[in-house]
Amino acid sequence: MSIPRPNLPADARLETLAVRDGLPASRWGENSEALYLTSCFVHPDAATAARRFANEEDAFVYSRFSNPNVTIMERRLAALEGTSGCIGTSSGMGAILLLVMGLLKSGDHVVCSQSVFGSTIKLLHGDMGKFGVESSFVSQTDVAQWRSAIRPNTKLLFVETPTNPLTEVCDIQALADIAHDAGALLVVDNCMCSPALQQPVKFGADIVIHSGTKFLDGQGRVVAGAICASEDLVEQKFVPLMRSCGMSLSPFNAWVVAKGLETLSVRVKAQSEAALQLARWLEAHPAVDRVYHPGLASHPQHALAMKQQSGIGGAVLAFVAGRARAGLFRRRRHAHLQHRRQLRRRAQHHHASGQHLARPAERGATSGGRHRAGHDPARCGVGEPGRSEDRPGPRPGCAGLT
């Protein structure tokens, strides 16, 4: 898109681009970008409008196609990932759907890590399979499996690194070489690290996928997604499809993500340091069997992670030792049962008004047949005064109801 950019120095650091790249300020000179919550834009005449709607002239015409807030977010994220192009989408899965619809057709083949997000596997294997796209799933870390899975019709290699939750790390450069030797593209889901800690294109990746709800937006504020790639690939393959199918990112959500990118580096690096401290503490704890964190020397891909990443965000996975875990569960269950007994005693002896009631055996005949014979209503939680879903005990509607 030839719409002007802010006048920034050529050697601006990524932290500066994360705050200042996007669009020039309006004539009002705002410091923080305005919100453009509009569906369409005004054009000087019908001929100009026709050219713009035909994508023959760059302009904002309709927010399903493009919007100033979305363009700001796209340009900032592309600058951070080191790509020349980016397209925002309504969600991370929307980005993956736009990717496969834009690049694949019936008869094409995808090689994908078996450790990626479950919805990605379902989309590739189930939904795209219905349209004749074949998928093979291989070990995240076994390069030989990736190489042996290549077919003449392979078009994409798809990987998420590190994975969630086991933090498996793949060799991006090795997979990029395999993909390019086969005439395919390597796609990397960079959600767990974000560009603050990892830039896959530096190691040969062609396309980077993002879900904005993890780190980009400031942690779970809005739903958003993006594809970062070359400008030619974005403009030729993804923009035309976006204009037809409409997985477009809302202006408000784009504005929130753009604001999140301004502090991304500071936030994620601080989270990464805290996560590593926690991982080291857990690894030294006698009640912990195993800790998964690429920053630890005990991680199987530690050396590779240190080559590709400058951290691992806020993710730590620990397995508690069996004996300690069993003891913890026993203590929790004992406390849970004690609380339930207290609730039963209150339900059996007192009405909400304070009036004393008979025990269940004495009032069984007046239950109206709601419970089966021999069934204790107190065990299912029905009739407990003030009971809500956040209090211990089974939900209403147990097997004792008739």
Image (cartoon, helix red, strand yellow):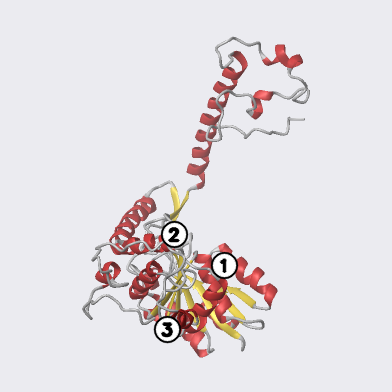
Q: Which mark is residue 120?
A: 1
Q: Secondary structure at mark 2?
A: loop
Question: Of the residues shown, which amino acid type is indicated by label 1?
Answer: Thr
- Tag 1 and tag 3, C-beta contact below 8 Å: no
Question: Of the residues shown, which amino acid type is indicated by label 3?
Answer: Glu
The answer to whether residue 13 of the structure is visible from this angle is: yes
- Residue 369 in the image: above or below residue 311: above
Q: Residues within 10 Å of mark 1 (few under 14, many from 20)?
A: some
Q: Is 266 left, or right, of 399 in this rendering?
A: left
Q: Identify the residue shown where x is 31% and y is 59%.
A: 267
Q: Which one is closest to the eye, mark 1 or mark 3? A: 3
C-alpha separation, residue under disc 1 versus residue under disc 3: 35 Å
Q: Which mark is residue 57?
A: 3
Q: Nearer the viewer, residue 325 or 169?
A: 169
Quadrant where the C terminus sits is top right
Give the percent coordinates (x, y) of residue 122. Answer: 62, 66
C-alpha separation, residue under disc 3 versus residue under disc 2: 33 Å
Give the percent coordinates (x, y) of residue 315. Answer: 41, 57
Q: Is 269 left, or right, of 122 in this rendering?
A: left
Q: Secondary structure at mark 1?
A: helix
Question: Of the residues shown, which amino acid type is indicated by label 2?
Answer: Thr
- Residue 351 in the image: above or below residue 301: above
User: Label 2 belongs to which residue?
Assistant: 213
Exactly how many numbered labels are in the figure? 3
